[in-house]
Amino acid sequence: MSNVENLVGEWLPLPDVAQLLNVSITRVHGLIDERALVAARVGERNIRSVPAEFLQDGQVVESLKGTIVVLADAGYSDEDLIAWLFTPDESLRGRPIDALREGRKTEIRRRAQTLAW
């Protein structure tokens, strides 16, 4: 199991994401292409999956897309940006994904932007 798999904990295969969002699997692929979601290949069968915490109340976490774009622009791969979002940070009193889920996107984006320097 890779480090990112351990950091995230719960992963959702793309068909499960489609069901939870009440959209087609094609739309889930579109969300990944649009950088609204990020997926990684995990597990023994190497299945493309999304961290469960990217979803909240039947939707993609609202501020996730912009944060993904900022991290990708900083040169982070999909797996690296997932790891960054799920790595605990004492100064945040939690993980960046927790802050996003709580609506604290400005603080997280500011930190993500500094990674490009």
Image: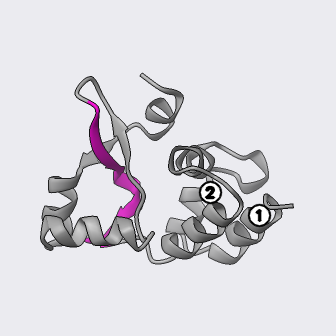
Residue type for callout 1: Arg
Instruction: Please provide percent x and percent y for residue 42.
Output: 34, 34
Could you tell me which residue is drawn at 68 percent across and 56 percent down? 75
Left or right: residue 91 versus residue 97 is right
Give how far apart the Cα atoms at labels 2 and 1 are.
Answer: 9 Å
Q: For residue 96, what is the image quadrant? A: bottom right
Instruction: Please provide percent x and percent y for residue 29.
Output: 26, 65
Could you tell me which residue is drawn at 26 percent across and 23 percent down? 44
In the current view of this chain or complex, which residue is farthest to the right? 117
Q: Which residue is mark 1?
A: 111
Note whether 108 is above or below 44 in the view shown: below
Residue mark closest to the camera, 2 vs 1? 1
Residue type for callout 2: Pro
Considering the numbered disc 2 on the image, is that residue within a helix, a strand or a loop?
A: helix
Q: For residue 14, what is the image quadrant? A: bottom left
Give yes or no for contact between labels 2 and 1 (Cβ–Cβ under 8 Å).
yes
Left or right: residue 47 versus residue 81 is left
Instruction: Please provide percent x and percent y for residue 35.
Output: 45, 69
State the extent of the magenta-drawn residues as a range: 46-59
Note whether 109 is above or below 94 in the view shown: below
Could you tell me which residue is drawn at 28 percent across and 32 percent down? 46
Number of the label disc, if any, that sits on residue 96: 2
Residue 48 covered by magenta stretch:
yes
